[in-house]
Amino acid sequence: MTTQKLPFAPGRSRGFAGGRALRPSGKVLPEHARRHNRSLVLQTLYLTGQQSRADIARETGLTRVTISALVAELMVEGLVLEVGQREDARPGKPAMLLELNSLAFQIIGIDLSDAAIFRGAVLDLRGQVISRVEIALEGSIGADATDKVVSLVESLVAAATLPILGVGVGSPGIVGRGGVVLTAPNLGWVGEPLQETLVDRFALPVLVINDANAATLAEHSFGGADSDMILIKIGHGVGAGLLLDGSPLLGGRFAAGEIGHVVVGTDGGAECACGKRGCLETWLATPRLDAALAAAATSDERTTILREAGQRLGIALAPVVGALDLAEVVLSGPGELLDGTLADAVLETLRERTMAEFHGGLVLRMTTLGEDIVMRGAAAMVLSGQLGVS
C-alpha cells in the first residue's frame, strides 16, 4: 500500500447518518461552508466528468475565487487533476479542464450478510471491484465472528495498492450510532462495537451500516435509482432500505426497514425464528423458499409457492408505498427465485392495494448489481461520508 497525504485524520470518520442528503446541492451556512463547498466541487466533477473552473462555478453557484481556492487545495491533496486545455471556439486563452482523480484512493467494502461467507473487496472511487477476498463463516458467532471480520479487513488492507479512503461495512441486524451492531442474532452479536474495533485496529475511517441500507446506497450511486425508493434485500433474512428525497431513512431507533419480522395477514403461517407465526421471513427468506420449492411435487405447486410469497411481500409493502408515495421498488436477492412469478405477484398485489391514479406507474425491478451490491454500497457510504460524493 502506498502513502499519500489524506484529506482526513487517520482513524477518524466524518460520519454517516440518516436525514442527511447524500449529495450536496447548494450553498450552506458559513460555519459549514468549507467542507460543503469542497464536496460540491467534487460531486460536480464526479457526476459530470471534465469541467473547467468556470463550468464548476456556474454549476454550483460559487464564486470563481472560491472555486479556484478549493481546486488548488484539492489538487494538492491529489483528488483533482488538470487534464489539458479545452479547444474553445471563443477567442482568448482556452479553459483548463479538471477531473476527479479516480486513482487518488481506494476503498474497502465489506458484506457480512451471507449466512456462510464474509465477503470483501478493494474498490476504486467509482465503486468498481479491483480485488476480492472471502472468508468462510463456518458457523462462527460472537467474538469469533468479529475476529473473522478483522482478518478479512486485514487481508484487504494488504491487497490495496493506493491509500485507503476508508472502510465500509454492511452488517445484518440493527446498526446504531457509532457503528454499534445493536443486535444481529445470526452472528450472535448484541451491542457489538464493530466500528470502534476496526478503527482501533487499523487507524482508518470506518463506517458500519445495516446491509439493506448499504444495498440501497449502492442502488442510488451505481444502480441508477434517482427517485424515492425502497429496496428489499432477500437472503438469509428479509430487510429493506429506504431512500427519501435523496436521504437514507434509518429511523429514530435505527430500525427503519426491519420488515422481516412483520406478521403478514391474519391467517397464521409457519413459525418464525423470532417466535411469532406468519412473519414475512417465513414466506420469503431464501432458505425457507428453497426448502418449500424442493418439497413441491409439480411445477404448478412451485408456481403457487412463488406467487404466494410475492403476494405476502406486496401486502407488506402496500401501506409503505401508499404512505410514502414511493416511485420505485427494487428487489435484491437470488434472481432465480425473485425474478418472474414472485416479482409479478408483488407488483400485481401492490396495484390492487394502492390508488391507481397515484401509484399506477410504480416501477418494480431487480437490481442489476448482483451479489456485489452490499460491498458497493459500503463503498458509496465511505465516499459520501468522507468526500460528500455519491
Image (spheres, grey):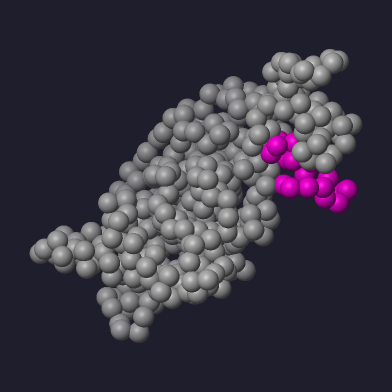
Q: Is residue 27 magenta?
A: yes
Residue 301, by quadrant, is bottom left
Residue 386 appears in the rendering: no
Residue visible at 63% across and 54% down? 246
Q: Is residue 317 above or below residue 91?
A: below
Residue visible at 69% across and 18% down? 83
Towards the viewer: 215 or 197? 215
Towards the viewer: 249 or 167? 249
Q: Is residue 160 magenta?
A: no
Task: Check the picture and name the quadrant holding the N terminus.
Answer: top right
Residue visible at 39% across and 65% down? 347
Residue 58, by quadrant, is top right
User: Residue 336 at x, y = what percent?
Assistant: 27, 51
Residue 166, by quadrant, is top right
For the record, the magenta segment spans: 24-44
Q: Is residue 123 above or below residue 32?
A: above
User: Residue 30 at x, y = what percent?
Assistant: 88, 48
User: Residue 4 at x, y = what percent?
Assistant: 67, 24
17 with respect to 85 (left or right): left
Residue 287 appears in the rendering: yes
Towards the viewer: 80 or 313? 313
Residue visible at 37% across and 68% down? 348
127 with respect to 289 (left or right): right
